[in-house]
Structures are given as C-alpha cells and as structure tokens.
Amino acid sequence: MSSPDPQTALFTTAQVRALDRAAIDGGIAGIELMERAARTALDALRTRWPRARSLTVVCGPGNNGGDGFLLAALARQTGLEARVIAISEKAGGDAGLARERFLREGGVLSPVDAALPEADVFVDALFGSGLNRAPEGAAARLVSALNAQSKPVLALDVPSGLDSDTGLAFDPCVRAAATTCFVGWKRGLFTARGPEQCGERSLATLGIPAGVFRDLSPDATLLVAGALPPRPKDSHKGRYGHVLAIGGELGAGGAARLCGEAALRIGAGLASVATRESNVGAILAARPELMPHGVHVPRNLEPLLASASVVALGPGLGQGEWGVGLWQAALEAGKPTVLDADGLNLLAKSPHVLPERTVLTPHPGEASRLLDCSTAEVQADRFAAVRSIAARYRAVAVLKGAGSLVADPNGRVAVCPWGNPGMASGGMGDLLTGVVAGLLAQGLDPWDAACTGVGVHARAGDLAARAGERGLLASDLFPYLRALVNGRV
C-alpha cells in the first residue's frame, strides 16, 4: 500500500493523533516533534511577516501551548521580542518541558487578565485540534481580544475555537491570517467556516516518515487541478454527447439557458433545452448554438429524451404541475442525470428511483430537505451530511458551499479547496449542473464528472473574481471554464 500524498490527504482529528502516536512509538520523542512544530511555525511567521520584530504568543495548557512556548523561546534566540500569555499556571508532559525551557532561558509571562501587549504578530497556541466546544473564561476573553485587535494572527495547527473535524466555528473562534497545520491536514480546515477562520494554510509534516502514513487511509482527499486530454484529430460532435437541460418555468428561463451553455462550454457536443415556449426566442437570441424546445406536457419530452445522452434536470424547473410532470418523465427515462434545484426539492417530497448514473448537487438548504433535518444540522457536519445523501439516494452527491464536498455511496469524499464569496450569486448552481452534465456526456463516470466539474467551476470562479468578488455573475465564468478544461490556465 502506497503512502498518501500529505498535501492532498485529509484526516480526522483522531487519525492525526494516531499518526502522532505512531511517530512517537517509532522513535521520535514527543518533545522533538514539538520542537519541529515550533521551528516550522516560526519559519512560516518570518517568511510571511519578515518585518515583524515582536511577538505575543497566547498559550494553553496542552501540547498546542507547548508548541507556542517553544516558538517563543526560538524567536528570542533569533533576536525577536517574544512575550507569552499562559491561561494556566502549569502544564504537564512535553508541554511542561517546553514551558520550563522558555522560563529557564529568561522568558517572562505577561498577565492573563491584562490588555494584550503590543506586538507585530500574535500567535494562537491555545487549544489546537483538541477543542470540540466553545472556549470559556480567560481563553474566551483572549480569543475575543485577538479578534478585536488589528495585527495579524498566526494559528498553530488549528485556530482555537474551530472544530477541526467539521469546520464548525464556535463562539468565539480565532480569526487567523495564517494557520500552520502539523502532521497532517485536518479535514475541517477546508470546509464550512474552516477556510474563513484559517486564512492562508500551510502544512508541516514534521519529518514524520512516510511509512507512518502508509497504514492509515485518509478520511477524505483534496481535489487537484486538472484538464481533459486533447481530442483526436478526427473528432465530431456526436462523440461528445448530447445534454438535455430541462427547466425554465415562467420567469426562470435564464437558469436553463445558463445550464445548457455551461454544458457546451465544458465540451459537450450538443445541448438542447426543454423549457416553456415563451423562453425559446430569448435563448436562441442569447446563444444560437443551443437548441431550445417549447415543452407543454410530459409527452413532448419523449423525442428529446430519446436523442439525449445526459439529462440536466432542475434549473428553474419549479414545483408546479408543469415541473412535476417533466421531472417524473425525465427520471423514468433512466438516462444519466444531474439533479439540482427544484429537481432536488421534488425528490425530497416524492422519493423516486434514480437512474444508475446520477449526480445530485444540493446547497445546504436543499441538503436539509433531502435528509429531513435542519440546515444548521447539515452545516454542523458537512462530511456526515454529504455521505448520508450519497448513501440514501445511491448517487454521487455534491454538497455546495465554502469547501464543496463530493461523496459517493461507498463513503469516499473529496473536498474542493477553491472558490470565493463572489460565487454566492444567482445562476452559479445552474452553471455547475451544466458543467457536470457536459462532462458526463463526454464519457466521464459520475464520480470523475462531479470532482472535475466542481474543481473547474470553482477555479473559474476564482479567475473571474480577480476583477472583484462583488458583482460577479455566473456568465462571467464561461471563458474561464473553456480555458481550464483545455489546460490553458
């Protein structure tokens, strides 16, 4: 069994503790790992803030605090001014050794209840990955003080107050400018509130041998950037599939149009749109390469479904009689399907056997309806939620949001590290539906289509947001989708 790539492997907190213990059992002393963590974090701090001359390190009673004490001691050795605020009067084990070293070498503890001292950079070494509840007492006051001041904060391993398994941020939670994660990536750093609280993330495996990782399968993996292979010279449109986008109730024709165009931009050979008759002219005028058809009743879908290789079902569909009829007819056709928006809402209301090759793309609200729970419960553990959807509906599932997740029915999960707040605008989900459908049409299986589609969609959003996140439109992503899928950026 080969070792996982540490830059893409995501672990639970329990798994990282097991890795840490295996390294110690293999002959690396705990205090040595702590020394390596402190040195790596100090190097990261000096690289990111080379003009910093003073540090204030806020230390908790455990090993995270020990990392902080050693960082402060090392900083003093290099000529930096380093103060420490400790929330407890003593520490045990390796953390106690680290505290003793700092004090033995002339370090002084600042009062825990006083105002934060002036510093160029603050270091959060309060709790790390072990916290699964909100900070309390002096710790809570220090977290709030860190967030209230204007200088940057470096978090060691995990921002204090962040659940490293789920990405749930307790109140209060450190808002870091950068986080140096130790041993292995904790999965919660990449979804929900994790990216917001962590800032810029970096990983230090602390020189742990690859063999330590070999026997432990990651809980999830990060998506990696990629493109589709070049096409053969004798290509023709029939080789790359025919997507049928079904949706566009009155007033929502743009959703179906965005979906259909996204399928073409990602490389589908053909794209048709089954929609309300009143949308046909506007779609033709906006994108003549699309083939829109006015559909009044479900039987009008039959010839369109017969010629389609993939169905994109839901954008702008509505939940009225018209939408319900088309939804039932499309699912009964058994074609590979991407189900989104009201296609998902109808599924939650009326469970239906799904085609064998299906991808579901809910946002948290739609996910809550699919699971019959609250949106807050979905967001409290996005990994559990996306796995539950994939298992319940026997389909590949994409849980959209900050750190979108992709899961298959067997529990495999991939996490998207790209995307930005500007993508929180109307039409972005319709675009993703078309992207995934277009990749299915080109022969990718549902897992690869979902992973590739989510990654390309998010990366296109990041490129489009270079002009600013506010005001970003879904259609702004079209040129970047084309460039990315062809490996041009």
Image (cartoon, rainbow, N blue to C red):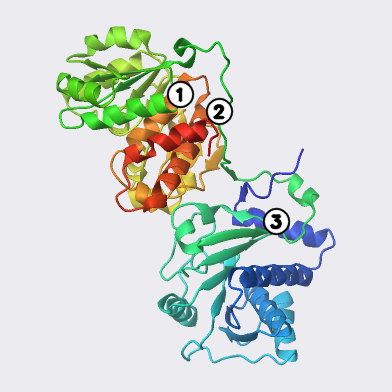
Give, as a three-letter code, the residue at label 3.
Ala
Q: Nearer the viewer, mark 3 or mark 1?
A: 1
Quarter of the image for residue 154 reads bottom right
Looking at the picture, tell me which residue is in the foreground, 361 or 163: 361
In the foreground, 204 or 405 = 204
Closest to the camera, between mark 2 and mark 3, is 2
In the rendered view, does 118 fall on the left or right side of 469? right
Name the kind of residue labelled 1 in the image.
Answer: Gly
- Is the C-beta separation of discs 2 and 1 under 8 Å? yes
Q: Amino acid at mark 2?
A: Leu
The extreme right residue here reads 27
Residue 391 in view here: no
* Contact between labelled residues 1 and 3, with CB atoms less than 8 Å apart: no
Mark before the other along the chain sequence, 3 or 1: 3
**For marks 2 and 1 on the same chain, the one whose residue lies earlier in the sequence:** 2
Kindly identify which residue carries mark 2: 228
Residue in view at x 33 percent, y 11 percent? 305
Which of the two residues, 386 or 247, is positioned nearer the viewer here?
247
How far from the left and from the top, in percent, is residue 376? 35, 53
The picture quadrant where one finds residue 23 is bottom right
Quarter of the view holding residue 284: top left
Q: Is residue 208 visible?
A: yes
Give the residue number, with chain letter if any, for mark 3: 18
- Secondary structure under tag 2 reads loop
Query: What quarter of the picture does the N terminus occupy?
Result: top right
